[in-house]
Image (cartoon, rainbow, N blue to C red):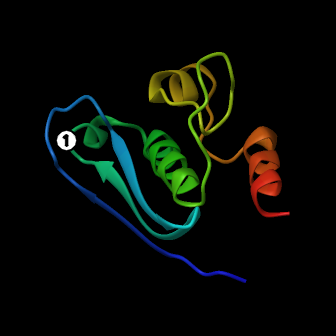
């Protein structure tokens, strides 16, 4: 089985409109390294579980999950205000888990 290194951290990279970011590095379509970031420019005012929602979303990218559009109560929905504020989602949901199964099984 392939292994990847994932580094998760938080720092303030300013007012760029993103409360999180994940950068992945791939070789022949396989993720071998990922940085999952939480932007502390925005998150100090967030409730604890909203920060978890951002971090879980970015970690989802680190394992290969893509963005989902609005209208889906899943952790991979791109907008924190929908994902957490509207639906209270801060952990992987069944659709997120199904996406992992599709990728790895």
Q: Position of residue 18 (x, y in %)?
A: 30, 35
Extreme-left residue of the structure = 14
Q: Secondary structure at mark 1?
A: loop
Q: Residue at x 69, y 23 (%)?
A: 72
Q: Nearer the viewer, residue 64 or 30?
A: 30
In this picture, residue 68 sits left or right of residue 5: right
In this picture, residue 86 sits left or right of residue 103: left
Extreme-front residue of the structure = 28
Q: Residues within 10 Å of mark 1 (few under 14, many from 20)?
A: some
- Where 42 falls versus 62 (above or below)? above
- Where 25 falls versus 39 (above or below)? below
Q: Nearer the viewer, residue 78 or 47?
A: 78
Tell me the quarter of the picture where residue 24 sits: bottom left
Q: Nearer the viewer, residue 98 or 49?
A: 98
Query: Mark 1 highlights which residue?
Result: 41
Identify the image quadrant of the C terminus.
bottom right
| Mark count | 1
Q: Residue at x 52, y 43 (%)?
A: 53
Q: Residue at x 46, y 30 (%)?
A: 80
Extreme-right residue of the structure = 105
Q: Position of residue 40 (x, y in %)?
A: 24, 47
Q: Residue at x 78, y 63 (%)?
A: 104
Tell me the quarter of the picture where residue 3 sits: bottom right
Identify the image quadrant of the N terminus.
bottom right
Q: Position of residue 81 (x, y in %)?
A: 46, 23
């Amino acid at each position: 089985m392939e292994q990847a290194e994932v580094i998760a951290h938080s720092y303030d990279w300013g007012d760029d409109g993103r409360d999180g970011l994940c950068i992945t590095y791939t070789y022949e379509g396989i993720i071998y390294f990922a940085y999952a970031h939480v932007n502390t420019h925005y998150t100090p005012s967030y409730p604890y579980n909203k920060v978890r929602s951002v971090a879980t979303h970015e970690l989802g990218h680190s394992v290969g999950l893509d963005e989902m559009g609005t209208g889906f109560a899943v952790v991979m929905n791109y907008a924190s205000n929908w994902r957490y504020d509207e639906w209270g989602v801060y952990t992987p949901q069944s659709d997120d888990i199904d996406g992992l199964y599709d990728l790895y099984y």
